[in-house]
Image (cartoon, rainbow, N blue to C red):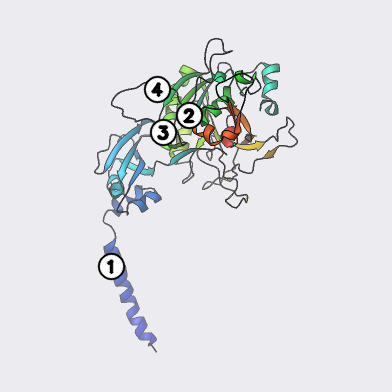
Amino acid sequence: MVDSALLRRWTLPVLTLCVLAAACLMPATADAGDGKLDPLLRARARALLGRSRVIVEFEPGAEGTLRSPGAIAGRQLPSSLSQVVDVDNQSLESLASDPRVRRIVPDRPAFATLERTGAATGATLVHEQLGLTGAGVGIVVIDSGVTPWHDDLNVRGRQGRGTVVHFKDFTRDIHPRVWVPDTPSDEYGHGTHVAGIIAGSGYDSDGRRAGIAPDAHLVVLKVLDAQGHGHISDVIAAIDYAIAVKDRYNVRIINLSVASGVFESYRTDPLAQAAHRAVAAGIIVVASAGNLGQNDAGESQNGGITSPGNAPWVLTVGAASHHGTASRSDDRVADFSSQGPTWIDFAAKPDILAYGVGIESLAAPSSTLASTYSAYLLDGTRRTGAKPYLSLSGTSMAAPV
Protein backbone atom coordinates (compact mmCIF):
# COMPACT_ATOMS: atom_id res chain seq x y z
CA MET A 1 0.00 0.00 0.00
CA VAL A 2 1.39 3.45 -1.01
CA ASP A 3 2.06 5.88 1.84
CA SER A 4 -0.22 8.95 1.32
CA ALA A 5 2.35 11.42 2.66
CA LEU A 6 4.99 10.08 0.24
CA LEU A 7 2.51 10.34 -2.64
CA ARG A 8 1.73 13.97 -1.82
CA ARG A 9 5.46 14.75 -1.54
CA TRP A 10 6.14 13.56 -5.15
CA THR A 11 2.93 14.66 -6.89
CA LEU A 12 3.61 18.41 -7.10
CA PRO A 13 7.19 18.15 -8.51
CA VAL A 14 6.08 15.59 -11.13
CA LEU A 15 3.13 17.75 -12.26
CA THR A 16 5.42 20.78 -12.47
CA LEU A 17 7.86 18.90 -14.70
CA CYS A 18 5.01 17.74 -16.96
CA VAL A 19 3.71 21.29 -17.41
CA LEU A 20 7.21 22.58 -18.21
CA ALA A 21 7.78 19.79 -20.72
CA ALA A 22 4.47 20.51 -22.45
CA ALA A 23 5.35 24.20 -22.68
CA CYS A 24 8.66 23.35 -24.31
CA LEU A 25 6.89 21.19 -26.89
CA MET A 26 4.44 23.95 -27.94
CA PRO A 27 5.02 25.15 -31.53
CA ALA A 28 7.07 28.32 -31.56
CA THR A 29 4.81 29.87 -34.21
CA ALA A 30 1.58 29.48 -32.23
CA ASP A 31 1.67 33.00 -30.81
CA ALA A 32 2.79 34.58 -34.09
CA GLY A 33 -0.29 33.90 -36.17
CA ASP A 34 -2.34 31.05 -34.76
CA GLY A 35 -4.92 33.43 -33.26
CA LYS A 36 -5.72 34.78 -36.72
CA LEU A 37 -6.70 31.38 -38.09
CA ASP A 38 -10.24 30.05 -38.29
CA PRO A 39 -10.62 26.93 -36.01
CA LEU A 40 -10.75 24.62 -39.05
CA LEU A 41 -7.56 26.17 -40.43
CA ARG A 42 -5.80 25.84 -37.06
CA ALA A 43 -6.32 22.09 -37.34
CA ARG A 44 -5.18 22.02 -40.96
CA ALA A 45 -2.05 24.00 -40.11
CA ARG A 46 -0.80 20.94 -38.17
CA ALA A 47 -1.26 18.70 -41.22
CA LEU A 48 1.79 17.52 -43.12
CA LEU A 49 0.01 17.39 -46.48
CA GLY A 50 -2.70 19.21 -48.44
CA ARG A 51 -3.63 22.72 -49.46
CA SER A 52 -6.46 25.08 -48.51
CA ARG A 53 -8.31 27.78 -50.41
CA VAL A 54 -8.74 30.67 -47.99
CA ILE A 55 -9.86 34.28 -47.76
CA VAL A 56 -7.20 36.51 -46.20
CA GLU A 57 -8.58 39.62 -44.52
CA PHE A 58 -6.13 42.53 -44.21
CA GLU A 59 -5.71 45.20 -41.59
CA PRO A 60 -7.10 48.56 -42.81
CA GLY A 61 -4.59 50.30 -45.05
CA ALA A 62 -2.30 47.25 -45.21
CA GLU A 63 -3.89 45.26 -48.02
CA GLY A 64 -1.85 44.17 -51.02
CA THR A 65 -0.81 41.11 -52.96
CA LEU A 66 0.58 38.48 -50.60
CA ARG A 67 3.89 36.84 -51.41
CA SER A 68 4.29 33.92 -49.04
CA PRO A 69 6.06 30.55 -49.53
CA GLY A 70 3.57 27.90 -50.60
CA ALA A 71 0.85 30.48 -51.39
CA ILE A 72 -0.76 31.29 -54.74
CA ALA A 73 -2.58 34.64 -54.75
CA GLY A 74 -6.02 34.70 -56.34
CA ARG A 75 -8.96 37.07 -56.68
CA GLN A 76 -8.80 40.31 -54.72
CA LEU A 77 -11.94 41.48 -52.90
CA PRO A 78 -11.25 45.20 -52.45
CA SER A 79 -14.60 46.06 -50.84
CA SER A 80 -13.83 43.80 -47.90
CA LEU A 81 -10.04 44.36 -47.84
CA SER A 82 -9.56 40.68 -48.65
CA GLN A 83 -7.90 38.33 -51.10
CA VAL A 84 -8.37 34.69 -52.07
CA VAL A 85 -5.23 32.59 -51.58
CA ASP A 86 -4.48 28.93 -52.32
CA VAL A 87 -1.96 27.92 -49.68
CA ASP A 88 -0.02 24.88 -48.54
CA ASN A 89 -1.41 23.83 -45.13
CA GLN A 90 2.08 23.89 -43.64
CA SER A 91 2.38 27.56 -44.65
CA LEU A 92 -0.86 28.71 -42.99
CA GLU A 93 0.81 29.83 -39.76
CA SER A 94 3.53 31.63 -41.71
CA LEU A 95 0.84 33.44 -43.71
CA ALA A 96 -1.02 34.34 -40.52
CA SER A 97 2.16 35.80 -39.00
CA ASP A 98 2.25 38.51 -41.69
CA PRO A 99 1.54 41.76 -39.77
CA ARG A 100 -0.73 42.96 -42.59
CA VAL A 101 -3.09 40.02 -42.05
CA ARG A 102 -6.03 40.48 -39.68
CA ARG A 103 -7.75 37.11 -40.10
CA ILE A 104 -7.79 34.02 -42.34
CA VAL A 105 -10.96 31.99 -42.98
CA PRO A 106 -11.73 29.12 -45.38
CA ASP A 107 -13.19 30.04 -48.78
CA ARG A 108 -16.20 27.91 -47.96
CA PRO A 109 -18.29 26.04 -50.55
CA ALA A 110 -21.35 27.76 -52.00
CA PHE A 111 -24.24 25.65 -53.30
CA ALA A 112 -27.73 25.85 -54.74
CA THR A 113 -30.56 25.44 -52.20
CA LEU A 114 -32.46 22.95 -54.35
CA GLU A 115 -34.81 20.03 -53.49
CA ARG A 116 -37.80 20.18 -56.73
CA THR A 117 -47.53 29.70 -59.45
CA GLY A 118 -48.80 32.67 -60.32
CA ALA A 119 -52.43 32.16 -59.24
CA ALA A 120 -51.62 30.96 -55.72
CA THR A 121 -49.24 33.85 -55.01
CA GLY A 122 -51.65 36.47 -56.30
CA ALA A 123 -49.10 37.58 -58.94
CA THR A 124 -51.56 37.07 -61.81
CA LEU A 125 -54.11 39.29 -60.06
CA VAL A 126 -51.48 41.98 -59.50
CA HIS A 127 -50.43 41.85 -63.17
CA GLU A 128 -53.97 42.07 -64.53
CA GLN A 129 -55.72 44.41 -62.10
CA LEU A 130 -52.93 46.64 -60.81
CA GLY A 131 -50.66 46.63 -63.85
CA LEU A 132 -47.57 45.89 -61.73
CA THR A 133 -45.22 43.66 -63.71
CA GLY A 134 -41.74 44.69 -62.58
CA ALA A 135 -41.24 47.03 -65.54
CA GLY A 136 -38.08 49.11 -65.13
CA VAL A 137 -36.83 47.15 -62.12
CA GLY A 138 -33.38 45.56 -62.29
CA ILE A 139 -32.95 42.26 -60.47
CA VAL A 140 -29.56 40.62 -60.02
CA VAL A 141 -29.58 36.81 -60.15
CA ILE A 142 -26.44 35.38 -58.53
CA ASP A 143 -26.53 31.72 -59.50
CA SER A 144 -25.28 29.18 -62.05
CA GLY A 145 -25.81 31.46 -65.05
CA VAL A 146 -28.61 31.58 -67.60
CA THR A 147 -29.70 30.24 -70.98
CA PRO A 148 -30.71 33.59 -72.52
CA TRP A 149 -32.05 32.20 -75.78
CA HIS A 150 -34.95 30.40 -74.06
CA ASP A 151 -38.16 31.74 -75.64
CA ASP A 152 -39.46 32.92 -72.25
CA LEU A 153 -36.35 35.08 -71.72
CA ASN A 154 -35.82 36.23 -75.29
CA VAL A 155 -37.26 39.09 -77.36
CA ARG A 156 -40.62 37.52 -78.14
CA GLY A 157 -43.35 39.75 -76.76
CA ARG A 158 -40.83 42.07 -75.13
CA GLN A 159 -40.82 45.00 -77.52
CA GLY A 160 -37.54 44.04 -79.13
CA ARG A 161 -35.41 43.34 -76.06
CA GLY A 162 -34.48 40.32 -74.02
CA THR A 163 -34.97 39.94 -70.30
CA VAL A 164 -31.27 39.40 -69.58
CA VAL A 165 -29.55 42.78 -70.06
CA HIS A 166 -26.14 41.91 -68.61
CA PHE A 167 -24.13 38.77 -67.78
CA LYS A 168 -20.81 38.17 -66.05
CA ASP A 169 -19.06 34.91 -65.24
CA PHE A 170 -17.23 34.73 -61.88
CA THR A 171 -16.31 31.03 -62.20
CA ARG A 172 -13.62 31.45 -64.85
CA ASP A 173 -9.90 31.90 -64.28
CA ILE A 174 -9.66 35.24 -62.52
CA HIS A 175 -6.36 36.07 -64.20
CA PRO A 176 -6.81 34.85 -67.80
CA ARG A 177 -3.84 35.28 -70.09
CA VAL A 178 -6.15 36.13 -72.96
CA TRP A 179 -9.27 38.14 -72.20
CA VAL A 180 -12.44 36.46 -73.50
CA PRO A 181 -15.82 38.23 -73.33
CA ASP A 182 -18.39 36.67 -71.02
CA THR A 183 -20.86 34.56 -72.99
CA PRO A 184 -24.09 33.71 -71.14
CA SER A 185 -24.25 30.04 -70.21
CA ASP A 186 -25.77 27.71 -67.63
CA GLU A 187 -24.41 24.18 -67.62
CA TYR A 188 -26.10 23.38 -64.30
CA GLY A 189 -29.58 24.75 -65.16
CA HIS A 190 -30.41 26.18 -61.74
CA GLY A 191 -29.95 29.84 -62.65
CA THR A 192 -32.16 29.52 -65.73
CA HIS A 193 -34.94 28.03 -63.59
CA VAL A 194 -34.60 30.86 -61.04
CA ALA A 195 -34.53 33.52 -63.80
CA GLY A 196 -37.76 32.14 -65.25
CA ILE A 197 -39.50 32.24 -61.87
CA ILE A 198 -38.60 35.90 -61.56
CA ALA A 199 -39.11 37.24 -65.07
CA GLY A 200 -40.08 34.57 -67.58
CA SER A 201 -42.64 35.77 -70.13
CA GLY A 202 -44.48 32.44 -70.36
CA TYR A 203 -44.18 32.58 -74.17
CA ASP A 204 -43.83 28.79 -74.60
CA SER A 205 -46.92 28.19 -72.45
CA ASP A 206 -49.14 31.02 -73.74
CA GLY A 207 -48.54 32.88 -70.48
CA ARG A 208 -49.49 30.05 -68.13
CA ARG A 209 -45.97 29.77 -66.70
CA ALA A 210 -45.08 33.46 -66.68
CA GLY A 211 -42.76 34.67 -63.94
CA ILE A 212 -43.69 36.74 -60.91
CA ALA A 213 -42.37 40.00 -62.45
CA PRO A 214 -42.33 39.28 -66.21
CA ASP A 215 -41.32 42.79 -67.29
CA ALA A 216 -38.34 43.13 -64.94
CA HIS A 217 -34.85 43.01 -66.46
CA LEU A 218 -32.16 40.69 -65.17
CA VAL A 219 -28.46 41.08 -64.46
CA VAL A 220 -27.14 37.52 -64.24
CA LEU A 221 -23.88 36.83 -62.38
CA LYS A 222 -22.58 33.28 -62.64
CA VAL A 223 -20.96 31.78 -59.51
CA LEU A 224 -21.75 28.02 -59.73
CA ASP A 225 -20.25 25.45 -62.11
CA ALA A 226 -21.87 22.57 -64.03
CA GLN A 227 -22.21 20.52 -60.82
CA GLY A 228 -23.72 23.41 -58.84
CA HIS A 229 -20.51 24.00 -56.88
CA GLY A 230 -18.81 27.30 -56.11
CA HIS A 231 -16.98 29.33 -53.47
CA ILE A 232 -18.17 32.16 -51.27
CA SER A 233 -15.39 34.40 -52.62
CA ASP A 234 -17.06 34.31 -56.05
CA VAL A 235 -20.44 35.14 -54.49
CA ILE A 236 -18.86 38.02 -52.55
CA ALA A 237 -17.23 39.34 -55.74
CA ALA A 238 -20.59 39.11 -57.53
CA ILE A 239 -22.39 41.02 -54.76
CA ASP A 240 -19.79 43.79 -54.89
CA TYR A 241 -20.11 43.88 -58.68
CA ALA A 242 -23.90 44.23 -58.35
CA ILE A 243 -23.35 47.24 -56.12
CA ALA A 244 -20.98 48.75 -58.69
CA VAL A 245 -23.52 48.45 -61.57
CA LYS A 246 -26.53 49.35 -59.43
CA ASP A 247 -27.22 52.72 -61.07
CA ARG A 248 -26.48 51.53 -64.62
CA TYR A 249 -29.19 48.84 -64.50
CA ASN A 250 -31.47 50.29 -61.78
CA VAL A 251 -30.73 47.30 -59.55
CA ARG A 252 -33.28 47.12 -56.76
CA ILE A 253 -33.00 43.48 -55.71
CA ILE A 254 -30.39 40.72 -55.47
CA ASN A 255 -31.72 37.16 -55.50
CA LEU A 256 -29.46 34.63 -53.78
CA SER A 257 -30.72 31.08 -54.26
CA VAL A 258 -27.19 30.01 -53.38
CA ALA A 259 -25.88 29.67 -49.86
CA SER A 260 -23.14 28.43 -47.59
CA GLY A 261 -22.96 26.84 -44.17
CA VAL A 262 -22.95 28.88 -40.96
CA PHE A 263 -19.63 28.57 -39.12
CA GLU A 264 -19.46 31.97 -37.40
CA SER A 265 -21.68 34.87 -36.41
CA TYR A 266 -23.19 36.98 -39.18
CA ARG A 267 -21.28 39.87 -37.58
CA THR A 268 -18.01 38.46 -38.95
CA ASP A 269 -19.06 36.08 -41.75
CA PRO A 270 -17.59 37.49 -45.01
CA LEU A 271 -20.65 36.48 -47.06
CA ALA A 272 -23.13 38.05 -44.63
CA GLN A 273 -20.99 41.20 -44.54
CA ALA A 274 -21.04 41.41 -48.35
CA ALA A 275 -24.85 41.24 -48.20
CA HIS A 276 -24.76 44.07 -45.67
CA ARG A 277 -22.78 46.25 -48.09
CA ALA A 278 -25.49 45.68 -50.71
CA VAL A 279 -28.26 46.62 -48.29
CA ALA A 280 -26.33 49.73 -47.25
CA ALA A 281 -26.21 50.65 -50.97
CA GLY A 282 -30.02 50.50 -51.14
CA ILE A 283 -30.45 47.01 -52.61
CA ILE A 284 -32.85 44.46 -51.14
CA VAL A 285 -31.09 41.11 -50.67
CA VAL A 286 -33.43 38.12 -50.88
CA ALA A 287 -31.91 34.77 -49.88
CA SER A 288 -33.16 31.22 -49.58
CA ALA A 289 -33.37 29.77 -46.07
CA GLY A 290 -31.85 26.40 -46.97
CA ASN A 291 -33.22 22.86 -47.10
CA LEU A 292 -32.18 21.53 -43.69
CA GLY A 293 -35.59 21.35 -42.03
CA GLN A 294 -35.19 17.61 -41.43
CA ASN A 295 -32.33 15.37 -40.39
CA ASP A 296 -31.32 12.16 -42.19
CA ALA A 297 -33.93 10.23 -40.23
CA GLY A 298 -36.73 12.49 -41.51
CA GLU A 299 -37.19 14.20 -38.14
CA SER A 300 -37.80 17.94 -37.86
CA GLN A 301 -34.72 19.92 -36.81
CA ASN A 302 -33.90 23.52 -35.96
CA GLY A 303 -30.87 25.67 -36.65
CA GLY A 304 -30.56 24.90 -40.37
CA ILE A 305 -30.76 28.44 -41.81
CA THR A 306 -27.88 28.92 -44.23
CA SER A 307 -25.62 31.94 -44.79
CA PRO A 308 -26.27 34.77 -45.61
CA GLY A 309 -29.91 34.12 -44.69
CA ASN A 310 -28.90 34.09 -41.03
CA ALA A 311 -28.19 37.84 -41.16
CA PRO A 312 -30.92 40.26 -39.97
CA TRP A 313 -30.44 42.60 -42.97
CA VAL A 314 -31.30 39.82 -45.44
CA LEU A 315 -34.88 38.93 -46.40
CA THR A 316 -34.77 35.17 -45.79
CA VAL A 317 -37.34 33.00 -47.54
CA GLY A 318 -38.54 29.57 -46.46
CA ALA A 319 -40.58 27.23 -48.67
CA ALA A 320 -44.28 26.42 -48.51
CA SER A 321 -46.45 24.11 -50.60
CA HIS A 322 -49.68 25.24 -52.27
CA HIS A 323 -50.69 21.59 -52.92
CA GLY A 324 -51.66 22.49 -56.47
CA THR A 325 -54.48 24.88 -55.52
CA ALA A 326 -54.95 28.65 -55.58
CA SER A 327 -56.56 28.54 -52.13
CA ARG A 328 -54.42 29.37 -49.12
CA SER A 329 -56.40 27.06 -46.81
CA ASP A 330 -54.30 23.99 -47.61
CA ASP A 331 -50.88 25.71 -47.64
CA ARG A 332 -48.23 24.09 -45.46
CA VAL A 333 -44.57 24.69 -44.68
CA ALA A 334 -42.44 22.32 -46.74
CA ASP A 335 -40.83 19.61 -44.60
CA PHE A 336 -37.39 20.31 -46.09
CA SER A 337 -37.46 24.07 -45.44
CA SER A 338 -34.87 25.19 -42.87
CA GLN A 339 -36.13 26.46 -39.54
CA GLY A 340 -34.70 28.85 -36.97
CA PRO A 341 -33.36 29.91 -34.65
CA THR A 342 -30.16 30.50 -36.55
CA TRP A 343 -27.03 28.64 -35.56
CA ILE A 344 -24.55 30.61 -33.38
CA ASP A 345 -26.59 33.88 -33.20
CA PHE A 346 -29.95 32.24 -32.31
CA ALA A 347 -32.00 34.76 -34.30
CA ALA A 348 -35.57 34.24 -35.50
CA LYS A 349 -35.58 33.18 -39.17
CA PRO A 350 -36.87 32.79 -41.88
CA ASP A 351 -38.60 36.14 -42.36
CA ILE A 352 -41.24 34.97 -44.81
CA LEU A 353 -42.53 31.89 -46.66
CA ALA A 354 -43.15 31.57 -50.39
CA TYR A 355 -44.13 28.64 -52.59
CA GLY A 356 -41.21 26.34 -53.24
CA VAL A 357 -42.69 22.90 -53.99
CA GLY A 358 -43.28 21.69 -57.55
CA ILE A 359 -42.48 25.09 -59.07
CA GLU A 360 -42.68 24.98 -62.86
CA SER A 361 -40.16 27.21 -64.58
CA LEU A 362 -37.59 27.20 -67.37
CA ALA A 363 -35.44 24.23 -68.31
CA ALA A 364 -31.95 24.65 -69.73
CA PRO A 365 -31.59 21.88 -72.34
CA SER A 366 -28.58 19.58 -71.85
CA SER A 367 -27.94 21.03 -68.38
CA THR A 368 -27.15 18.86 -65.36
CA LEU A 369 -30.57 19.40 -63.79
CA ALA A 370 -32.48 18.73 -67.02
CA SER A 371 -30.62 15.42 -67.32
CA THR A 372 -30.87 14.47 -63.64
CA TYR A 373 -34.58 15.33 -63.35
CA SER A 374 -35.67 14.43 -66.87
CA ALA A 375 -38.87 12.87 -65.49
CA TYR A 376 -39.91 16.37 -64.34
CA LEU A 377 -39.45 18.08 -67.71
CA LEU A 378 -42.69 19.59 -69.02
CA ASP A 379 -44.07 20.47 -72.43
CA GLY A 380 -45.30 23.93 -73.31
CA THR A 381 -48.12 24.81 -75.68
CA ARG A 382 -45.82 25.58 -78.62
CA ARG A 383 -43.63 23.36 -80.73
CA THR A 384 -40.06 23.49 -79.36
CA GLY A 385 -36.90 21.47 -79.94
CA ALA A 386 -36.81 20.33 -76.29
CA LYS A 387 -39.21 20.39 -73.39
CA PRO A 388 -39.03 24.02 -72.23
CA TYR A 389 -40.07 23.65 -68.58
CA LEU A 390 -38.97 21.81 -65.47
CA SER A 391 -40.65 21.25 -62.10
CA LEU A 392 -38.33 21.65 -59.10
CA SER A 393 -38.64 22.15 -55.36
CA GLY A 394 -36.52 23.93 -52.79
CA THR A 395 -36.04 27.22 -51.02
CA SER A 396 -34.07 28.05 -54.20
CA MET A 397 -37.47 28.36 -55.85
CA ALA A 398 -39.14 30.12 -52.91
CA ALA A 399 -36.66 33.03 -52.89
CA PRO A 400 -37.42 34.20 -56.48
CA VAL A 401 -41.17 33.69 -55.92
Residue type marked 4:
Asp
Residue type marked 1:
Ala
Crowd around label 1: few <14 · some 14–19 · many ≥20 (10 Å): few
* 296 to the left or right of 86: right
* 222 to the left or right of 208: left
Answer yes or no: do the residues labelled 2 and 1 have beta carbons within 8 Å?
A: no
**For the residues carrying marks 2 and 4, which lies nearer the camera in this image?**
4
- Report helix, strand or loop for mark 1: helix
Report, in whole angstroms, how far the alpha carbon at label 4 lies from the one at label 1: 59 Å
Q: Name the residue under label 2.
A: 278
Q: Mark 1 points at which residue?
A: 21
Residue type marked 2:
Ala
Residue 255 image point, x, y percent? 53, 29
- The numbered disc on residue 234 is 3
Q: Decide which of tag 4 and tag 3 comes sooner along the chain.
A: 4
**For the residues carrying marks 3 and 2, which lies nearer the camera in this image?**
3
**For the residues carrying marks 4 and 3, which lies nearer the camera in this image?**
4
- Report helix, strand or loop for mark 2: helix
Residue 128 image point, x, y percent? 69, 17
Q: Decide which of tag 3 and tag 1 comes sooner along the chain.
A: 1
Report, in whole angstroms, how far the alpha carbon at label 2 lies from the one at label 1: 52 Å
Identified at 71% across, 37% down, the residue is 331
Location of residue 58 (image quadrant)? top left
Furthest toward the top, the residue is: 159
Q: Decide which of tag 4 and tag 1 comes sooner along the chain.
A: 1
Furthest toward the bottom, the residue is: 1
Residue type marked 3:
Asp
Q: Mark 4 points at which residue?
A: 182
- Judge by depth and name the residue closer to the eye, 315 or 100: 315
